[in-house]
Image (cartoon, helix red, strand yellow):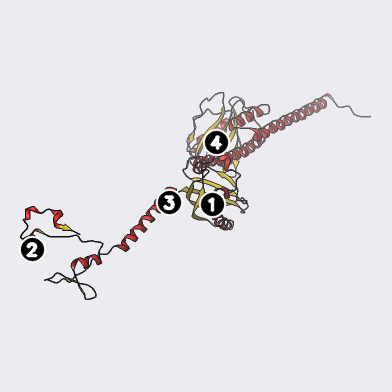
């Protein structure tokens, strides 16, 4: 005969089943919340959207009436509250010198472990820590988990209750720790994306505003990138350059040198040189090219990157200067100058040349300079040689002849 359970045993069995059922329901709710959060980790377009989704997703499984996400900056030991929902404290100002405060958030950052603590323990911690007490209202119970990344702990996600000291348990701590891990992964990913986006934006600003041509070509020596200034320099639209062979911009007689230099680039050579380019309207543009190989993530050379500085005007000035220097040199070679001591007869005024012959002054000067002589008679000689002619009747034209 099978013994029938008494009423008390039945009640205990029912209570156990109800507890197990409630646990299953809670676990299902937790799984649903974690799934929703993991989905938000992938799809959220902004941090605030992610924070709101986490807050709402946790609400069915954890009391999130008072919920915040705080972000920690190790470099300046500061803390900012990125997302806050609080029924008592409406002001959460940034915190500086976090390591010197007795805040629970700082305690989690220092320990890098989750913390579940009640009010009497909170007050005791503040009293004994020897640190600066925060101005926030102490909660009946506080639960926080660290946001840990490869860069270190970057913040804390926390919930608290000002009324119910038994609001949270160990399972809640495990759930919050799991959520914190997902949030940390997301924030790290977004940190990397933001850093990359910022770097790309700075690069974009540089290449679009710098007054230098910038160009990249692939292994087939086709243009994969050109900045607006290069297109302006060459008289093209950007879309007319992208995908074209760089050879279209070069003179035929320079193609062999271009090919040789690209072979060197593919071996890793970095160099600077002068190059001629053809503009769209047929002008000759001289440039200084600073070229280096482009390397992919595996270390393989996949093309070349160059900056191109227009030196056409400088080249024109240099050419004109060279022509002037040549003309000057030719002129200098033709100029004959007298140097040193010139022997001259004190009586007849003949000059002895370097071969020992005595020459008339005009002959010697003509042979050693570019000067030509025009013969005339000075007034003193007229009186002596031509006394029959009155001096005032003669003009300069009468007195000078070649």
The residue at 10%/54% (across/down) is 394
Q: Position of residue 215 (x, y in %)?
A: 54, 47
Q: Nearer the viewer, mark 2 or mark 3?
A: 2
The image quarter in which residue 51 lies: top right
For disc 4, the marked residue is 71
Above or below: residue 20 compared with residue 235: above
The Cα atoms of the two marked residues, 2 and 4, are separated by 116 Å
Mark 1 surroundings: few (<14), some (14-19) or many (≥20) residues within 10 A:
some
Viewport quadrant of the C terminus:
bottom left
Mark 2 surroundings: few (<14), some (14-19) or many (≥20) residues within 10 A:
few
Query: Which one is earlier in the sequence, the residue at label 2 or at label 1?
Result: 1
For disc 2, the marked residue is 385
Viewport quadrant of the N terminus:
top right
Nearest the eye: 181 or 104: 181
Tell me, for residue 315, which label it has, or none: 3
For disc 1, the marked residue is 251
Q: Nearer the viewer, mark 3 or mark 1?
A: 1
């Amino acid at each position: 005969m099978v013994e029938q359970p008494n009423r008390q045993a039945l009640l205990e069995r029912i209570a156990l089943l109800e507890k197990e059922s409630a646990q299953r329901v809670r676990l299902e709710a937790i799984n649903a919340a974690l799934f929703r959060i993991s989905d938000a980790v992938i799809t959220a377009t902004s941090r605030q959207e992610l924070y709101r989704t986490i807050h709402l997703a946790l609400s069915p499984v954890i009391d999130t009436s008072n919920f915040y996400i705080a972000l920690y900056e190790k470099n300046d030991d500061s803390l900012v509250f990125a997302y806050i929902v609080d029924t008592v404290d409406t002001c959460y100002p940034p915190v500086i010198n976090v390591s010197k405060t007795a805040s629970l958030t700082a305690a989690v950052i220092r320990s890098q472990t989750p913390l579940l603590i009640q009010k009497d323990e909170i007050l005791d911690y503040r009293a004994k820590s020897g640190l600066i007490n925060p101005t926030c209202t102490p909660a009946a119970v506080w639960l926080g988990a660290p946001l840990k990344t490869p860069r270190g702990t970057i913040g804390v996600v926390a919930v608290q209750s000002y009324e119910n000291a038994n609001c949270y348990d160990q399972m809640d701590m495990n759930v919050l720790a799991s959520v914190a891990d997902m949030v940390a992964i997301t924030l790290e990913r977004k940190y990397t994306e933001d850093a990359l986006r910022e770097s790309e934006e700075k690069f974009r600003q540089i290449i679009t505003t710098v007054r230098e041509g910038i160009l990249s070509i692939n292994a087939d020596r086709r243009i994969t990138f050109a900045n607006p200034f290069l297109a302006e320099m060459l008289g093209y639209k950007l879309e007319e350059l992208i995908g074209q062979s760089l050879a279209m911009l070069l003179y035929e007689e320079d193609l062999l040198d271009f090919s040789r230099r690209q072979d060197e680039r593919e071996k890793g050579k970095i160099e600077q040189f002068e190059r001629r380019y053809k503009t769209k309207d047929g002008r000759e543009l001289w440039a200084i090219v600073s070229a280096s190989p482009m390397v992919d993530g595996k270390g393989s050379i996949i093309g070349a990157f160059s900056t191109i500085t227009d030196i056409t005007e400088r080249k024109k000035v240099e050419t004109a200067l060279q022509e002037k220097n040549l003309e000057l040199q030719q002129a200098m070679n033709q100029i004959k100058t007298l140097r040193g001591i010139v022997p001259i007869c004190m009586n007849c005024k003949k000059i002895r040349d370097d071969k020992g012959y005595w020459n008339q002054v005009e002959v010697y000067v003509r042979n050693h300079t570019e000067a030509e002589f025009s013969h005339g008679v000075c007034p003193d000689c007229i009186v002596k040689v031509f006394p029959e002619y009155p001096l005032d009747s003669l003009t300069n034209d009468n007195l000078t002849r070649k």
